[in-house]
Image: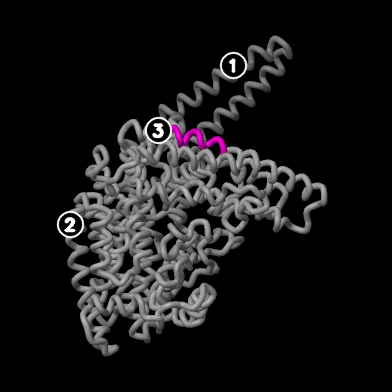
Amino acid sequence: MKSLKFQLSAVALAIALTACGDDASKEGTSNTQKEVEVKSEQVTNLEQTASEEQALSEAEKAKKIYQSYWEENLKMNPLNATFMGDNRYNDRLGDFGSEKGRAEALAFHKKYLNKINQIDQSKIEGQALLSYQIFKNERQAAIEGEKYPDYMQPIQQFYNPFNFFAMLGSGKSAQPFNTVEDYENWLSRLNQAYDSVDVIIKNMRTGMENGVVQPKALMVKVLPQLKAHIVDDVEQSLFYSPIKSMPESFSPEDKQRLTKEYVNTIKTMVVPMYSRMHDFIKDEYLPATRETAGMVALPNGKEWYAFKVKQTTSTDLTPDEIHQIGLDEVARIHGEMKGVMEQVGFEGSLQEFFEFTKNDPQFIFDSKEDMLQAYEDLRETLDKTAPDLFKVIPEAQFEIRAVEAFREQSSSSASYQRPAPDGSRPGIFYVNTYDLSARPTWTVESLYLHEAVPGHHFQISTQQELKDIPDFRRFGGTTAFIEGWGLYSESLGKEMGVYTDPYQYYGALSAELWRAIRLVVDTGLHAKGWTREEVLEYMEKNSAAAEARRVSEAERFMAIPSQALAYKIGQLKIRELRTLAETELGDDFDVREFHYQVLKDGALPLNILEAKIKRWVDSQKS
């Protein structure tokens, strides 16, 4: 660092001398002497700063890199900031895949990979080492991923940015509508959303030119999602909802002005935006879509899918290996289900049992309200038993809501939206109430365990409430851990006082079976060239899922390749580590402590989680 000190001193001295010459010509020798003294003090301060930098530990240097990265990341991705309760950028939308934006993102990741590479890994340990490994892996993956043209396929029925705009604009999601400024911020974002249509259409046309297009079966499902927001009556628009619920504290002048601006924006920007996107897809994009279902049909599709598999699972498992794991798990779970058949006295084949549990009236809710209430009723039981298995209970709360009508036909059975870290907004457990015949009563307990307690709400809230990890870990995480934890949580039902009804336990097995089937069909689609029809046939033969669910799930796998692998691969790893700990520690095994060790560092990559738990087991033995 001596050379750095010299450079700082030389620069400061040069500045001092230049300033001295200017001031001497105007103020005389006395002022010159004072200026030199001031500049000399600045030189000393610069040298002291350089010395302090040198004194920082490698862990502290890395921490400063993470802090700088996180601030830049939020500024580049303002929607992420909003969902995390950081309202500084609520008037900005961020880039939606423009050439300039993609170049900036790549440069951003390369810059921070270069910064973290300057940290001496051998001099850090514990949490600091975990952060270093995760941060470096994420930057490398982001850089590698840039060579695959995801931006050419920016929209499908499952992840539709225009659905996202509508959810935010409804006033019931992360975008706040509490102050006049909040209302103005959303108008600013709507202006930018209108402009984003040009970028999205340009990228889709580039995809059409290069043979990178979505399957037709997916894009026909996008049209009604868009059409739902093309309204003649402004007050029927979801985007008008914040005006209907405007705070009483607003002045009459603000209420009148905002109402006028929202009406004008919906008429001149929102409806035209949805109309334009709808017509482009219907008239231009749909004729160019493909009849094939999997990534194997895309240019470089096999390699592209293998990359996604590696990132989703955080393992070195190949698609072929995962396919076989799926086949083995399907066979094992079928055996467990036959045990339930014997318990309830059902006489017939497994296929006949599937049909019985799928169609018998006793397993169908009478109304959407009854379905939602069934989930609410589980709160009391599981809130009481959670402390038996967990030593840390998150403070954040959550609400149970039905999936909105405009997206329910293409949505999964359930999903979870994280709470605001500051407690200003609870988490949301979304339940799909569309087509009650496809949502049997025996799915309730396992779905609740997965999405709420002790699943996603529990894990994500616990992670957000950690104080000793950098923000990129508090608000990030590996999909295989997050979804693996959700599925592992389903397996805790009997330990938590539910699954006392054999049909509810069958529901848990059915849910686990579904995740095993996903391993088979996701790899079948994207690595082996299965058709949509072959996927539907396999699901019908091996599960009790109703047709509506089979179709929506098959098209989900087509839309987001590899994501469905995360559940079973993650669950198998967590269960494997629990079995290891139980075997190695014997009577000293404490399930509360094991769960604490799994959750206390956030959603780690599975390879890093495995190494960490093995170190913990060794420490307990010694």
- In the image, residue 109 lies in the stretch drawn in magenta: no
x, y (%) of residue 263?
A: 69, 45
Nearest the viewer among 241 and 351 is 351
Residue matched to label 3: 205
Tag 2: Cα neighbours inside 10 Å, few (<14), some, or many (≥20)?
A: few
N-term mark: 3 or 2: 3
The foreground one among 569 and 247 is 247
Q: Earlier in the sequence, mark 3 or mark 1?
A: 1
Q: Residue furthest top?
A: 25
Residues under numbered marks 3 and 2 in contact, where contact means CB atoms less than 8 Å apart: no
Q: Residue at x 57, y 49 (%)?
A: 229
Q: Which residue is mark 1?
A: 17
Relative to 374, does residue 604 appear above or below in the rendering? above
Question: Given the image, on which type of amino acid does mark 3 rest?
Answer: Arg
Magenta-drawn segment: 194-204
Query: Residue 335, position in %: x, y?
Result: 20, 77
Q: Secondary structure at mark 2?
A: helix
Q: Main secondary structure of the magenta part?
A: helix
Picture residue at 36% right of the left edge, 66% below the top: 485
Query: Marks 2 and 1, how far apart in space?
Result: 70 Å
Residue drawn at x 73%, y 46% is 258
